[in-house]
Amino acid sequence: MEKKSIAGLCFLFLVLFVAQEVVVQTEAKTCENLADTYRGPCFTTGSCDDHCKNKEHLLRGRCRDDFRCWCTKNC
């Protein structure tokens, strides 16, 4: 009985591992570019994110250490 449960557990881990690899391979590659139309220093990621999504129609945005707004898009 113990061998069956160990075999079943190994099979479950194998299935989960394979499923995770499939998800990782299907994710889109993203690139980060300086926002074209964001003006002024970037202090809050929320405002940068809102700008990138609504004004530049990209995936998301964030403020980086250089106080500039960087937008993320699919490459």
Image (tube, helix red, strand yellow):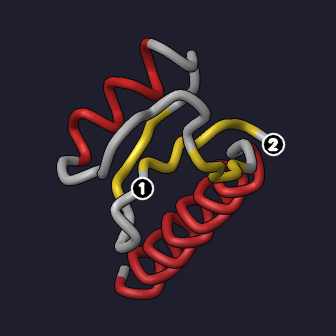
In-image side of 9 versus 36 (left or right) = left
Task: Assess whether mark 2 and mark 1 are in contact (beta carbons under 8 angstroms).
Answer: no
Residue drawn at point x = 38 percent, y = 65 percent: 64
Residue type for callout 2 = Cys
Residue 74 sits above or below residue 2 on the image = above
Residue type for callout 1 = Arg
Q: How many marks?
A: 2
Question: Residue 7: where, in percent of width, then height?
Answer: 53, 78
Image quarter (top left, top right, bottom left or bottom right) of the C terminus: top right
Residue drawn at point x = 18 percent, y = 48 percent: 44
Considering depth in this image, is 35 or 62 the residue closer to the camera? 35
The residue furthest right is 75
* SS assignment at label 1: loop
Label 2, residues with CA under 10 Å away: few <14, some 14-19, many ≥20: few
Sooner in the amino-acid sequence: mark 1 or mark 2: 1
Residue 25 sits above or below residue 71 on the image = below
Considering depth in this image, is 48 or 41 the residue closer to the camera? 41
Question: Residue 54: where, in percent of width, then height?
Answer: 43, 13
Alpha carbon of mark 1 to alpha carbon of mark 2: how far? 21 Å
Image quarter (top left, top right, bottom left or bottom right) of the N terminus: bottom left
Residue 53 sits above or below residue 69 on the image = above
Residue 19 numbered mark, or none: none
Residue 68 numbered mark, or none: 1
Question: Residue 46: where, in percent of width, then height?
Answer: 21, 37
Residue drawn at point x = 65 percent, y = 37 percent: 73
Label 1, residues with CA under 10 Å away: few <14, some 14-19, many ≥20: some
Considering depth in this image, is 35 or 12 the residue closer to the camera? 35
Question: Residue 48: where, in percent of width, then height?
Answer: 33, 37
Asked which quadrant contains residue 36, the reply is top right
* Residue hosting label 2: 75
* SS assignment at label 2: loop
